[in-house]
Image: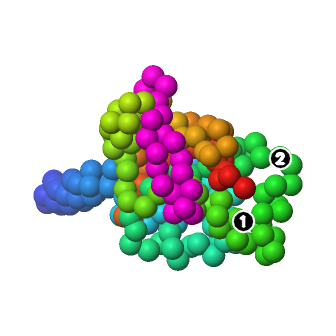
């Protein structure tokens, strides 16, 4: 009798494990900032869990862009890390978060967003087609130039400052995030 119960418990355990594994395989996650990013969640739902993107999340909230980045999209987001924001001159982030600088903050944040879903392979194809460079139109109306150095992808802003994509292809339900190491800025 004990063997039968043990066998039944083992079958149930294996069944639950198989179900969990099947779900996990469908949910191929990428770890960003110590947290798994789930393709079934939207950009905001995932970003709030990354300890490397607390500044970005605070800025998105202050700019009133949460609803936009939770919408259907799709969007390609070049997401600067906290360390990227820390590279800005002292006091810049605090100043941008002030209500009187709302439009500037919105412009900077939407400068990091391109309409449509462009994974790393898509960007690389555009770069190849552009003979080494691809111009990406941002949601703010500006442009970013994508290029490669070896196998690494970079984006350059309108001021000539470059940012390396450190983690590519973080798929979301409404687009894709590429983690970048530098904040890019539109021409002012």
Q: Residue at 65% across / 59% down in the picture?
A: 108
Which residue lies under the disc numbered 2? 89
Q: Which sits in the foreground, 63 or 57?
A: 63
Q: Residue furthest right?
A: 91
Report the side of 91 relative to 70 (left or right). Answer: right
Q: Residue at 56% across / 36% down in the picture?
A: 164
How crowded is the residue under tag 1: few (<14 C-alpha within 10 Å), some, or many (20+)? some
Which residue lies under the disc numbered 1? 104
Mark carried by residue 8: none
Say whether disc 2 or disc 1 marks the residue closer to the N-terminus. Answer: 2
Element type where label 2 sits in the image:
loop
Q: The N terminus appears in which quarter of the rendering?
A: bottom left
Q: Residue at 86% across / 49% down in the picture?
A: 90
Asked whether 105 falls inside the magenta stretch, the response is no
Q: Where residue 49 appears, x then y in whole percent?
A: 56, 59
Question: Can the viewer see residue 184 in this picture?
Answer: yes
Q: Where residue 85 appears, x then y in whole percent?
A: 72, 49
Q: Quadrant of residue 99?
A: bottom right
């Amino acid at each position: 009798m004990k063997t039968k119960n043990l066998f039944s418990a083992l079958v149930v355990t294996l069944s639950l494990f198989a179900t969990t594994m099947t779900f996990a395989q469908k949910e191929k996650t990428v770890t960003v900032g110590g947290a798994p990013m789930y393709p079934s969640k939207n950009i905001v739902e995932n970003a709030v869990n990354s300890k490397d993107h607390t500044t970005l999340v605070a800025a998105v909230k202050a700019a009133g862009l949460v609803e936009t980045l939770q919408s259907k999209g799709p969007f390609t987001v070049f997401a600067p890390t906290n360390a990227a924001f820390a590279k800005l001159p002292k006091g810049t982030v605090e100043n941008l978060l002030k209500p009187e600088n709302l439009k500037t903050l919105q412009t900077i944040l939407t400068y990091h967003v391109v309409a449509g879903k462009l994974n790393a392979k898509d960007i690389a194809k555009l770069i190849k087609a552009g003979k080494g460079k691809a111009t990406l139109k941002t949601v703010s109306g500006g442009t970013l130039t994508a290029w490669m150095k070896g196998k690494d992808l970079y984006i350059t802003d309108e001021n000539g400052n470059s940012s390396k994509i450190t983690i590519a292809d973080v798929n979301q339900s409404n687009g894709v995030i590429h983690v970048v190491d530098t904040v890019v800025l539109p021409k002012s």
